[in-house]
Amino acid sequence: DADVTQTPRNRITKTGKRIMLECSQTKGHDRMYWYRQDPGLGLRLIYYSFDVKDINKGEISDGYSVSRQAQAKFSLSLESAIPNQTALYFCATSDGAGTGNEKLFFGSGTQLSVL
Amino acid sequence: GQNIDQPTEMTATEGAIVQINCTYQTSGFNGLFWYQQHAGEAPTFLSYNVLDGLEEKGRFSSFLSRSKGYSYLLLKELQMKDSASYLCAVRDGDYKLSFGAGTTVTVRA
């Protein structure tokens, strides 16, 4: 089983619909992140959480919200989806151990298309 | 915010060497990472530099010059499986990680 699991893998929806993307992890990491990836723009941080009660905005949080229900779960919501939110979404975790080499572990991604 | 620049595409022949450059501007610096991403897959960690110099790991090496805001990833003895996108990422003074747009490397036989 994957250490970082995202559901669904693919989703097509219509403008104005509410969408939730789920992420769960078995790595025991405290830190979790949501990124979106667009061609030519790279990965951009939407929201991140360093602990269950901690939520922080990234560089492109408008139009998104998150919930950290437990250490292992971090969900991303689009309250009213719009076409420019069509992208590949990645959840990631890190151990936050305080060492310099704190690398990210990514889920397999969710391809979201908003029509 | 951060400005991270890397070339969009590079092509090389199997067995050759390719060097992917990354330049950055950041408020504070707490490390530079390289990730590999095969088409349709998630990024995976390749290397980490926080001090100036070269870090070697098998066929892959990464170099950092903090004063120049410059790094490169060197891929030696290229194999077909090295065809992928390579992402440069910089961690700033607030420990937030930002990614460049990625360099797509195509290895030809």
Image: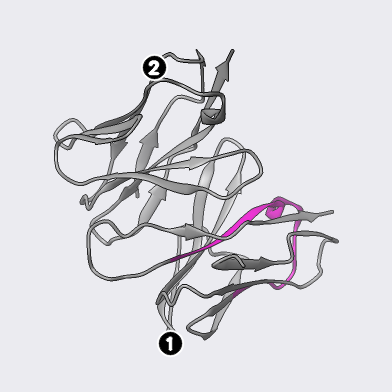
Taking the spot 55% from the left edge, 19% from the top edge, the residue there is B107
Q: Is residue A81 magenta?
A: yes
Q: How many marks?
A: 2
Residue for point 43% across, 39% down? B100
**Chain for mark 2?**
B
Give the x, y percent position of residue B90. Answer: 32, 47
Q: Foreground residue, A20 or B11?
A: B11
- Vertical side of B88 occupied by A5: above or below: below
Q: Is residue B60 above or below residue B91?
A: above
Q: Is residue B30 left or right of residue B58?
A: left
Please give the label number shown on residue B17: 2
Asked if badges 1 and 2 are on one and the same chain, I answer no
Magenta run includes residue A16: no
Using the numbered discs, state the Cα–Cα distance from disc 1 to disc 2 in whole angstroms: 47 Å
Range of the magenta residues?
Answer: A75-93
Q: Residue at x 56, y 21 (%)?
A: B106
Left or right: where A56 falls relative to B84: left
In the image, residue A11 lies at what x, y percent? 79, 60
Q: For label 2, count other residues whose C-alpha is less than 10 Å away and answer few (under 14), some (14-19) or many (20+).
A: some
Q: Quadrant of residue A55?
A: bottom left
Q: Is residue B10 above or below residue A52?
A: above
- What residue is shown with label 1? A53
Q: Position of residue B36 (x, y in %)?
A: 48, 40
Q: Residue at x 37, y 37 (%)?
A: B4
Please identify the quarter of the rendering in which residue A1 is found: bottom right
Q: Chain of mark 1?
A: A
Q: Residue A100 or A13: which is nearer the viewer?
A: A100
Secondary structure found at label 1: loop
Q: In what quadrant of the picture does the C terminus of chain A appear?
A: bottom right
